[in-house]
Amino acid sequence: MGEIVPLDTFDDLQTMSFVRPDLREQPIVCQLHCGTSSNIFRLLSHSCRPSAQFAQVKASGQYVMTVRAIREIPDGAQITVFYGSGWKTRACLCETCRGRDV
């Protein structure tokens, strides 16, 4: 799944910030680092026009990371998410941007 670490522990492409939507002043509470182990999110590809988004949901008193569809996803289609603007080091090659610099 990954390792939960304190804020600002890692600054790489294998780390995701965990946001608590119920907190106003410090909504980012920790990071999920997947550099030494993997999780199901590795199966999601990037798109600048994603079919889903990451969402934090409270379940059984704890916040968990989920993936929520934001538009209809046809049967057999790949589920994509927007990784964020800071992860790219070169031109985006998603189906929306293929061939143009984003």
Image (tube, rainbow, N blue to C red):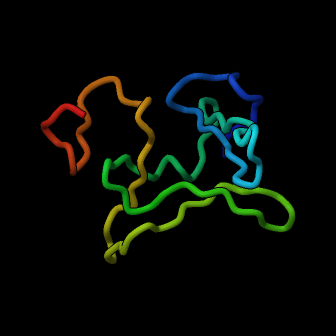
Question: What is the x, y in percent for residue 49?
Answer: 31, 54
Judged left or right of residue 52, residue 23 is right
Q: Is residue 47 above or below residue 25?
A: below
Residue at image location 59% in from the left, 33% down from the top: 15
21, 40: nearer the viewer: 21
Q: Residue furthest front?
A: 25
In percent of width and height, residue 16 lies at: 59, 38
Q: Nearer the viewer, residue 63 or 33?
A: 63
Q: Would residue 101 be found to the left or right of residue 69 on screen?
A: left
Q: Residue at x 28, y 25 (%)?
A: 90
**Measured along the vertical axis of the image, is residue 10 above or below residue 51?**
above
Left or right of residue 77: residue 101: left
The quarter of the picture where residue 35 lies is top right
Residue at coordinates 70% horizontally, 22% vertically from top-left?
9
Q: Quadrant of residue 94?
A: top left
Q: Nearer the viewer, residue 43 or 30?
A: 30
